[in-house]
């Protein structure tokens, strides 16, 4: 299943062709071909972005919870 973000990104990539269609410089067939070419390119680019950013915000280890204890005063320091 194609993600909606891929379709939106492909639409943005093919927006100049859509603009030229509304100015009667291209026919609808060329616009659709450019959109269909943009879909797999957008899917690869967004998959790469998801791959690169997948590890952000995660930690390798969960860690162990600790309770803080008050620090002991050093010998010879005033209380």
Image (tube, rainbow, N blue to C red):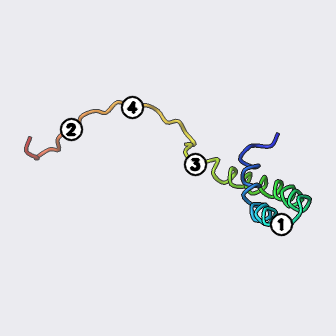
Q: Specify the quadrant of the image occupied by residue 66.
A: top left
Percent coordinates x, y for residue 32 in the rendering? 87, 56
* Cβ atoms at labels 4 and 3 below 8 Å apart: no
Local packing at callout 4 (Cα closer than 10 Å; few below 14, some 14-19, many 20+) is few
3D distance between C-alphas at marks 3 and 1: 46 Å
3D distance between C-alphas at marks 3 and 2: 37 Å
* Cβ atoms at labels 2 and 1 below 8 Å apart: no
The residue mark sitting in front, 2 or 1, is 1
> N-terminal of the two: label 4 or label 1?
1
Q: Quadrant of the C terminus?
A: top left
Find disc 4 in the rendering and name its residue. 66
The residue mark sitting in front, 2 or 4, is 4
The residue mark sitting in front, 3 or 1, is 1
Find disc 2 in the rendering and name its residue. 72
> N-terminal of the two: label 2 or label 1?
1
The residue mark sitting in front, 4 or 1, is 1
Percent coordinates x, y for residue 18 in the rendering? 78, 60
Percent coordinates x, y for residue 45 in the rendering? 74, 57
Find disc 1 in the rendering and name its residue. 24
Residue at the limit of the structure toward the right, as seen here: 29
Q: 72 or 16, which is in the foreground? A: 16
Find disc 3 in the rendering and name its residue. 56
Q: Secondary structure at mark 2?
A: loop
């Amino acid at each position: 299943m194609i993600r909606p973000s891929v379709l939106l990104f492909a639409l943005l990539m093919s927006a100049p062709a859509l603009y030229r269609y509304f100015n009667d410089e291209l026919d609808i067939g060329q616009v659709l071909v450019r959109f269909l070419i943009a879909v797999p390119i957008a899917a690869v680019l967004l998959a790469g972005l998801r791959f690169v950013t997948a590890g952000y915000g995660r930690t390798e280890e969960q860690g162990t919870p600790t309770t803080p204890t008050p620090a002991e005063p050093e010998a010879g320091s005033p209380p």
